[in-house]
Image (cartoon, helix red, strand yellow):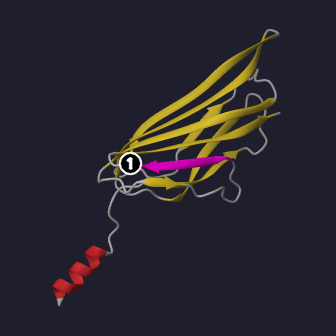
Amino acid sequence: MLLCVALTACDKEEKGSYPPTYQGFRYVPSTVYAGDSVTITAVQLKKGHYLNTTKYSWSMTVQVDNNGVTESKTLTHAVQTNYGGISDADPVWGVRLPANTQPGTYACSFKAEWSNSADGIGGTFNGGTGESCTGNINSYSYTLYSQANGSFRLTVR
């Protein structure tokens, strides 16, 4: 009888790797000005499963006024961790906009890459846009790795 219970319990375990399902981005403060520090979070709806080495990358190109000349400045951030061993928390980027950032709307992009610790289940995952979230993040599961790509627009006043 114990053997039957043990086998039944094993059958209910989730098998295979899959990435988190995201519901978009949240940023604070909600009104952003040149020179502000902004905290941007990729919000998970559902945690990933059987993921190891993880790399999160963020990028945003803003226009700055350099003594009357408009120039592009790309702001980036990358962090490497272990999703299943160190942290499965929502990825966060704390960025300070240059004081000379010109008002406008700027695209912010996000990329996540995971190595799977079990065969990936395959497929695309998207949690839609959650409450008080903006933008969109699609996650993809493959046999050996998983990834996610997303973006949103940040308005600077």
Q: In the rendered structure, does residue 140 fall within the stretch colored magenta?
A: yes
- Can residue 88 be seen? yes
At a point 58% along the width and 58% down the height, the residue shown is: 127
Q: Residues within 10 Å of mark 1 (few under 14, many from 20)?
A: some
Q: Position of residue 112 (x, y in %)?
A: 48, 41
Q: Is residue 36 left or right of residue 51?
A: right
- Where are the magenta residues, as a range? 135-141
Residue at horizontal 29%, vertical 75%? 11
**Above or below, 8 relative to 127:** below
Instruction: Give 80 or 8, whichever is nearer the viewer.
Output: 8
Q: Is residue 20 visible?
A: no
Q: Residue at x 32, y 70 (%)?
A: 13
Q: Quadrant of residue 150?
A: top right
Please, is residue 90 above or below residue 151 in the view?
A: below
Q: Main secondary structure of the magenta part?
A: strand
Disc 1 element: loop
- Residue ID for mark 1: 142
* Position of residue 78 in the picture relative to residue 37 (left or right): left
Please state which of residues 34 and 22 is positioned toward the viewer in this rendering. 22
Q: Quadrant of the C terminus?
A: top right
Would you identify the image quadrant in which residue 113 lies?
Answer: top left
Locate residue 86, reporting x and y percent.
37, 48
Give the side of residue 119 with respect to residue 36, left or right: left
Residue nearest the viewer, comparing 139 with 68: 139
In the displayed structure, 139 sits above or below 12; it is above
Quick one: which residue is furthest to the front in this view?
Answer: 123
Quadrant where the N terminus sits is: bottom left
